[in-house]
Image (tube, grey):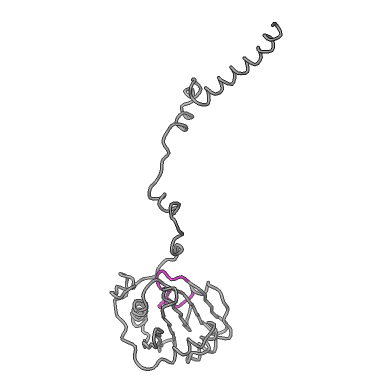
Amino acid sequence: MPLALVACGPRATADNNLDSLDAELTGNGQGNTRDPAMTSALQDQIMVDPALAGQSNADAVRPPQQPYSGATPPDSIASGSAGAPAGGSVAAKPAPPPSGACPQCTARRDAVTLAALARRQGDRRTSGCAGSLAYSTAWAQRLPADLPLYPDARVDEAAGSSSGSCALRVVSFSTSAAVGGVIDYYYARLTAAGYSAEHQADGGQHVLGGTRGKDGGAYVIYVSTRGDGRTGVDIIANNGR
């Protein structure tokens, strides 16, 4: 019997120590009341900003339909055309209906690359620089100031050349806007900047092209609906930044 008492003595002491530690951690004793900061950290409610929590997309069944756009839109026109941005510094000016044949539509269908499309242009300053094109999406930011990317543009491919006297820029992108809205947007901007603007079409392919006499600037814009429902746009300009 004495041996049993000796064996149980240390075990009882250890159990008492564990009970005291549990009380300190859970607050059943006086441990947490000694430290107000600890008590506040453990017992206060968690602060949540609903506006930020809604951006996490954590409760979505599927991913967003399109990636977030970080692009800064350029000045836009006040146009009533479907898909055209509202507000801005350029007055609304809807493009005239397409007229005549559309040889540029054929050039677009036959060209596989941006360089091939540039080589098919009638403007010699454009076609002559096509051979020195270098591909990089950075060229999309060096279009002429009067011919910016469309607001919400998602760039697919871009190329450019600043070799010698060349200032060629070729950019391919897509937008959620309708074809008519894109045509009206560029027609208003370019005519306000002193360019001519001819609208041609063949089926679903629309082309807007023109020149500016004071600096020899020339551009061609191809606009059509893509298979995924977005509007595809190709811009060729010979006077980029």
Q: Position of residue 36 (x, y in %)?
A: 46, 27
Which residue is found at the position 54% from the left and 89% from the top?
A: 128
Reply above or below: 154 against 53.
Answer: below
Q: Main secondary structure of the magenta part?
A: loop
- The quarter holding residue 150 reads bottom left
Identified at 66% across, 14% down, the residue is 10
Lateral position of residue 68 relative to residue 191, left or right: right
Left or right: 82, with 160 as reference point = left
Q: Position of residue 2 (x, y in %)?
A: 70, 6
Q: Nearer the viewer, residue 217 or 131?
A: 131
Residue in the image at 47% along x and 33% along y: 41
Count of marks, rendered view: 0
Residue 97's image quarter? bottom left
Q: Which residues are magenta?
A: 141-154
Q: Residue reaching furthest right?
A: 3
Residue 1 position, x and y percent, is 69, 6
Asked if residue 56 is among those painted magenta in the image, a careful observer would answer no
Residue depicted at x 47% and y 32%: 42
